[in-house]
Image (cartoon, rainbow, N blue to C red):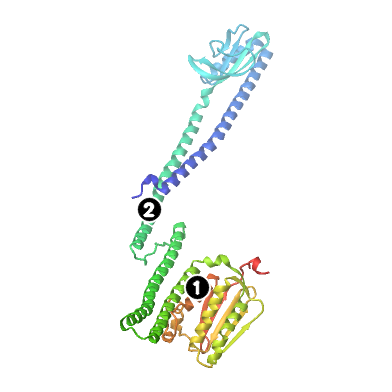
Amino acid sequence: MARPFRSSAVTWSVGYVLLGVAALIAFAIPLWYAWSVTIRDGRADILRDDLQHLADVFRREGPDGLTALINARVNMQIAGERILLLTDAGHRPVAGNLQRWPEGLPERAGADTVSVALDGHPVDAVLVHRVLPGGYHLVVGRDLARYQPLERRFAYGLAAAVAFVTLFGVAGSVLIRRELLSKVHGIRQTVLAIMQGDLRHRLPVRGSGDELDTLSQTINGMLDHIEHLVRGISDVSNSIAHDLRTPLAELRSRLEDIALTRPPPAETFAETEAALADVDRVIRIFNALLRLAEIDTGARRSGFVAVDVASVAAGVVEFYEPAAEVRGVALRFDGDGDARVSGDPVLLAQAVNNLVDNALKFVGDRGSISVAVRSRAGDGVVLTVADDGPGISDAQRTRVTGRFYRGDASRGTPGVGLGLSIVDAVARLHGGSLELADNHPGLRAEIVIPGGAELPVAATS
C-alpha cells in the first residue's frame, strides 16, 4: 500500500500549492507596498492642502477668524474624522479637538507620526505642523486607524486566496493520487503476472494519449521484444539440444565401438576421422552461435569502416568459382562502380559467402547463380544472389531466417540451419534487411543496406 505522503502526486501537488502561495505573496507584497505609499503620500498631500487653506484664512482674517472656522469644522465633522489644533506661542490650545499640545511633536514645521489623545482615547495620527505669524502653531492631522478596516479586508482576501489555493491543491492531489494509483495498480498487476512467467500480459492502454499511456505503449513494445527473444532462446535451446545430440551420440557410439571391439588400425583411423568430423560439426555450431551473439550485441558496429560491397562480393564469387566449375554451375558476378557503405567487411563477406554457399547446395548441376551489386543514388546498396534452384515456398520464407530452421529441401544437405540467420543478423547490424523473393524459378535473396551513414575518414584514403 502506497503511503500518502510519499506519493509523487502528493509531492507535486504540495509543490504546486507552495508555488501558488509564493506567487500570491509575491503579488501581494508589492501591491501592499504600493497601497501604503499611495495612501501615505495622498494623505500627506491632503493634509498639506488643508493646512494651506487654514493658513490662508489666518492670513486674511487673523487668529479670530481661523479660531471660528476651526471650531465650526470641529462641531460639524464626524468625531475623529480630522484632527485640528490652533495654539498660541506657548502651545496653549486656542481652538480644535485636541486638549493639549501633542507630546513628541517637534517644534519644526513638517509631517510626523505621533500618539495623541482624541476624545479621551489614545490614537496614532499623522500630524502636519506649521508656525503662523505671531507665534501661533497650526496642526492638522488624520487618525491612522481610519484605513485599517480596508487593510484588514486586504489581509482577509489574501488569506482567503491562500486557503483557496491550498484547499484545491489538497483536493487535486487526492484526485490525482487516486487516478495514478488506479493506473499503477493495473501496471503492477501486469508486472506481477510477467514476473510469474506469463509473458503474454501487457500493460493497460486507455487510449488517452497521456504520458502514462505513452510509457505503457513503450513498455509493451519492450515486452513484445522480450517475449520474442525468450521464445527464440527456448527454440534455440531445443534446436541446439537436438542438433548436438546426433553428432555427440554418433561420436560416443564410434568411441564406444572402438573401445569394445579393438578394430585394426586402418578401421580405427577411419572411425577416428569420422569422430573428428562430428567434433568439427559441434564446433561449427558453437562458432556460428558465438558469431550470432556477437552480431546481436552490436559489438562489431564500433569497428565499422568504409567497405566496397562490390569488391567483397567479387572476392566471394572468385573463391567459389572452382566449386561451381566442378558441378558445371554458371556463377556470374555483376557490379557497378562505387558501392561503398560503412560496415564490417568480414561480416559482409560472411553474409555473401552464406548466400552463395546455400545457392550451390540447392541449385542443380548445370544450373546458374548470379551475384549482383547495385548502388542506389543516395539510398545505399543492394546485393542480390539469385539462383534457378527449387527455391523456397511462401510459407517457409518467413521462417528460414530462424535459428536452426531447416526446410524439407535441406534435410539431406550439410549444415545446421544457421546460415540465413547469420545473413539476416548481419543485414540488421548494418541497418538493413534480408529480403527473399521468388526468382521464377529459384530463390532471389537481397541484402539491402541503406545509405546516409557517414563513411569513416580513415578508411577512405
The image quarter containing residue 404 is bottom left
Residue position marked by numbered label 1 in the rendering: 425
SS label for mark 1: helix
On the image, the x and y values in percent for residue 185 come to 36, 56
Q: Contact, CB < 8 Å: mark 2 with mark 1?
A: no
On the image, the x and y values in percent for residue 75 come to 54, 16
Looking at this view, is 420 or 273 the one in front?
A: 273
Residue position marked by numbered label 2 in the rendering: 181
Is residue 158 visible in the rendered structure shown here? Answer: yes
**Mark 2 vs 1, N-terminal side:** 2
On the image, the x and y values in percent for residue 41 come to 61, 26
On the image, the x and y values in percent for residue 138 come to 62, 14
Mark 2 and mark 1: Cα distance apart in space = 42 Å
Q: Identify which amino acid the numbered label 2 is placed on.
A: Leu
Looking at this view, is 311 or 379 the one in front?
A: 311
Q: Residue furthest front?
A: 265
Vertical side of 419 occupied by 329: above or below: below
SS label for mark 2: helix
Is residue 367 visible in the rendered structure shown here? Answer: no
